Image (cartoon, rainbow, N blue to C red):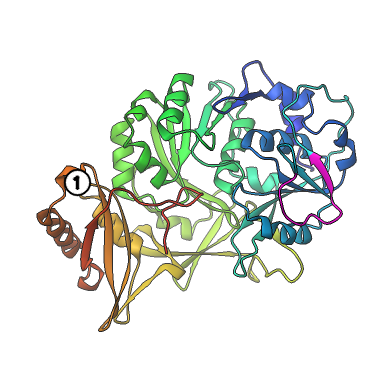
Amino acid sequence: MLQLSLTTLLDESAAVGQSIAMATESLAFDDCVRATCLAERFASLEGKSVVLMAGSQLRTAAALIELDGWARRMVICPPDLEPERLSAVMRDAQADALVYGGDRPPPGETGDALLVACELSKRRRDQRALRLLETEWVMLTSGTTGDPKLVVHTLDTLTGAIGPRSEAAPAPYWATFYDIRRYGGLQIFLRAIKARGSLMLRSHDESLDDFLKRAGDAGVTHISGTPSHWRFALMSPAARRLSPSYVRLSGEIADAAILDALSAFYPHARVSHAYASTEAGVAFEVDDGHPGFPAALLSEPADGVAMKLVEGALAIRSNRTAVRFLGEGAAALRDADGFVDTGDMIERRGERCFFMGRRGGIINVGGAKVNPEEVEAVINQHPSVRMSLVKARKNPITGAVVVADVVLMDAAAASPALKDEIIRACERRLAPYKSPALVRFVPSLAVTATGKLTRE
């Protein structure tokens, strides 16, 4: 049975007050259904492959709602797509059109594609029966050649983990630190729509304090981000303005330190961490307050999701995984049994499985393997530590040693004695070769555009 489009879903459930909001603009869901952001060009995009560089999250949201079920394919470009990569995206997507925001198209080769400006307009759209195509939703991930990989989803695969909202439950007001042009943010966008709620987005030039204040003043009930997002958020006095009923983490390993901190900070909220990736989709959610996940999930498929370990890495098969990679000569997404290799390393300890880090992020210390995230989890549990980043430093004897950059709760507490204390805490819980040879106190740590710690 064909999945209904977002426009049809909203048309059935639109209510006064449902909206997507940013710092200076908002868009009612009713406007998304009744109006057009693509003006007279909308009809010409029927059945076409469309690349979206709409200029803002709000314009992207409006275009996604309008084009789903109408276009054959929608390619969602993240805001930091390098102009020189656009031609490769257009080629691999077999693009017929480029939807852009602002006064002029973005730089980059677009070939003979139709150029369509996206404007937040309340011009009423012609009421016509929409052609309900099963539109391909295409997301970009980093590629090995520099050009991004194009990952194909459908609305079914993207919403497979989103259950129906109880009619007795109030509509959620979602907020997210993510950008909806990436997988984590797109999940929250779709959750807000399917739950018939509203969504607050962070504007690109909005400070963290201002975003948290705005979310608190609006009465946001559900909010999501990476553990790094949350570590920064908890440093802000404005975090006290929020009183959420649900806090969600994903995108990075959620260690005990951040889970405990959030549970203490928001005692009335359900704190959960989800595992998902652009290729594998949403696999599971854990809300028992502990890091890792129950080992039983490896042997007992739940909600149609099967998982296994292949040479220590998690592999996933479900109806939520992406359909394929797009483009000539693209690699296979799944193995012969339908599993997607996530590249995330797992260690089983009794009845619990723990994420250890990425396969490619291992530090080799004299032939012994160290997962930086395992060391960070220990450091982050020290009461004086806000967050940490563990990395390798070259060593003539062992090839590499472990070093740690640490952000303190209070910078004034920095001292040689505290460094020794952190190292000793690692030595008590980790093998000697895993303990940092050097701890450096730093004022902050860099994060990527996706909200994850920047790892060299």
Left or right, 251 with respect to 15, comes to left
Asked whether 111 falls inside the magenta stretch, the response is yes
Q: Is residue 151 positioned above or below 164 on the image? A: below
Asked whether 307 falls inside the magenta stretch, the response is no
Q: Is residue 89 positioned above or below 381 on the image? A: below
Write down the residue under mark 1.
384
Q: Residue drawn 30% across and 32% down?
A: 265
Q: Specify the amino acid type for callout 1.
A: Ser
Q: Secondary structure at mark 1?
A: loop
Region in magenta: 105-116
Asked whether 435 or 40 is in front, the reply is 40
Q: Residue furthest top?
A: 16
Q: Main secondary structure of the magenta part?
A: loop
Spot occupied by residue 122 in the image (x, y as percentages of width and height): 76, 21
Q: Residue drawn 45% across and 39% down?
A: 248
Q: In which quarter of the view is residue 164 placed?
A: top right
Residue 33 in view here:
yes
The C terminus lies in quadrant: bottom left
Q: In which quarter of the view is residue 335 placed?
A: bottom right
Q: In which quarter of the view is residue 358 placed?
A: bottom left
Q: Is residue 197 positioned above or below 42 on the image? A: above
Q: Residue furthest left?
A: 417
Spot occupied by residue 437 in the image (x, y as percentages of width and height): 21, 68
Left or right, 323 with respect to 292, comes to right
The N terminus lies in quadrant: top right
